[in-house]
Each structure stands twice: as structure tokens, then as C-alpha cells.
């Protein structure tokens, strides 16, 4: 319940517009009572394990979750997953990569065709997943210069770029 209370604090302070939190089933009544007493809109999804997911936050965001109407996160389409992840505050680039991966796993690969990802996107993916804290590489990217070495210290290509390139070939 400590993390739930922290999420509640972040929502009240405006750090989050929507929160997704998973709790054991025995906490459901307590969570519902707390959210209702504070006038915070929420949606609950029961999980097969006996736990539950609670989405809570701004009325508009919770309305979108309600509108999607799925009872399990695993049933979300790639598009619904993208919307939800963005609303939960996940990084847009990571959501784009996740979307591409989810779509590439489907039988109808209509999103990507050979050459549809630009070198800039690949470079952004690289900078996100390899040495994220490197100011030198970030500065090189934002100035339009490509870092001279896209491989990690062991000579491996970043997995995200490898996976994207493998899909496109």
C-alpha cells in the first residue's frame, strides 16, 4: 500500500494524469474506499491470479481506459497499448519501439516496409538504449553528427536496432 499511496501523492501533485497499479485482491475494498473518498475516478481489472489492476486519475484519462474496455492488458491492440503507455507517462520513443515490435509480431505487417525507418530513428533508438547517460553522444546526435561507433563496449549492435533491421530485411 506504500507504493499505492505514493502514486496517489504523485497524482494529487500533478506528476501523473493516469496511474496503473497492481495490488492483491484483499486490498480492493481499501483502494476503492480511498479513491471514492477523494473523488478520484478509477477502473478496476480483475486478474486471474486474484490480484487486480486499478487505473486511476484524471476523469478524461480514466474515460479512455473505460472506452477501450478490455479486461486484460494482454488483450490490448498495439494501438491501444500505445495510447495507454503514453497516457501512463512512458517515454514516447520507447512506446514507438514497443508499437513497432507488437505490430511486427502480427501476421499482417502493414506498418513497416523495407526502408520505412529513417537513419534518424535508428540513431535515436541507439542513443536511448546504449550508454543513455553519455552527454557526448547526446550532444553529437542533437548537433546532427552521427557517433562514430554504434556498438557497445563488447562490439555488439544494440538489440533494438538489430531487431528493427532484422525485421526490415
Image (tube, grey):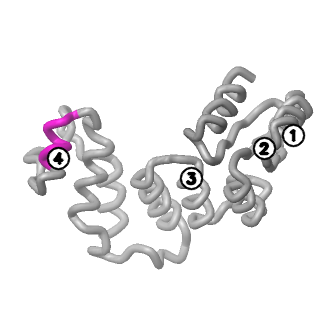
Q: In this view, does 5 lie to the left or right of 147?
A: right
Question: Of the residues tagged 2 and 4, which is closer to the observer?
Answer: 2
- Mark 1 neighbour class, 10 Å CA radius: few under 14, some 14 to 19, many 20 or more: few
- N-terminal of the pair, mark 3 or mark 1, is 1
- Mark 3 neighbour class, 10 Å CA radius: few under 14, some 14 to 19, many 20 or more: many
Q: What stretch is highlighted in magenta?
A: 134-140
Q: Is residue 85 above or below residue 102?
A: above
- Residue, disc 4: 150
Q: Is residue 132 left or right of residue 8?
A: left
Report how far apart the C-alphas of labels 2 and 4 lie in the structure.
46 Å
- Residue, disc 2: 40
Q: In which quadrant of the rendered image does the C terminus lie?
A: bottom left
Q: Is-magenta flag for residue 153?
A: no
Q: Residue at x 78, y 44 (%)?
A: 40
Report how far apart the C-alphas of labels 1 and 4 lie in the structure.
51 Å
Q: Is residue 109 above or below residue 159?
A: below
- N-terminal of the pair, mark 1 or mark 4, is 1
Asked which quadrant contains residue 134, the reply is: top left
Residue 128 x, y percent position in the rendering = 31, 45
Q: Which element is circle 4 on?
A: loop
Residue 75 seen in the figure = no
Q: Which of 150 and 157 is in front in this view?
A: 150
Q: Are marks 2 and 4 in contact (CB under 8 Å)?
A: no
- N-terminal of the pair, mark 2 or mark 4, is 2
Q: Which label sits on residue 85? A: 3
- Residue, disc 1: 36
Q: In this view, does 162 lie to the left or right of 18?
A: left
Q: Which residue is drawn at 32% across and 43% down?
A: 129
Amino acid at each position: 500500500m506504500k507504493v499505492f499511496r505514493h502514486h496517489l501523492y504523485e497524482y494529487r501533485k500533478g506528476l501523473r494524469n493516469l496511474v496503473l497499479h497492481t495490488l492483491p485482491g484483499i486490498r480492493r475494498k481499501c483502494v476503492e474506499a480511498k479513491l471514492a473518498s477523494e473523488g478520484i475516478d478509477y477502473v478496476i481489472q480483475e486478474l486471474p491470479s486474484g490480484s487486480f489492476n486499478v487505473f486511476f486519475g484524471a476523469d478524461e484519462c480514466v474515460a479512455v481506459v473505460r472506452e477501450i474496455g478490455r479486461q486484460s492488458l494482454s488483450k490490448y491492440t498495439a494501438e491501444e497499448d500505445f495510447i495507454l503507455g503514453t497516457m501512463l507517462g512512458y517515454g514516447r520513443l520507447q512506446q514507438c519501439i514497443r508499437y513497432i515490435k507488437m505490430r511486427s509480431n502480427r501476421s499482417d505487417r502493414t506498418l513497416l516496409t523495407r526502408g520505412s525507418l529513417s537513419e534518424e530513428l535508428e540513431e535515436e533508438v541507439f542513443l536511448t538504449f546504449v550508454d543513455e547517460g553519455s552527454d557526448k553522444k547526446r550532444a553529437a546526435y542533437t548537433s546532427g553528427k552521427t557517433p562514430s561507433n554504434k556498438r557497445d563496449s563488447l562490439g555488439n549492435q544494440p538489440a533494438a536496432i538489430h531487431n528493427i533491421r532484422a525485421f526490415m530485411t
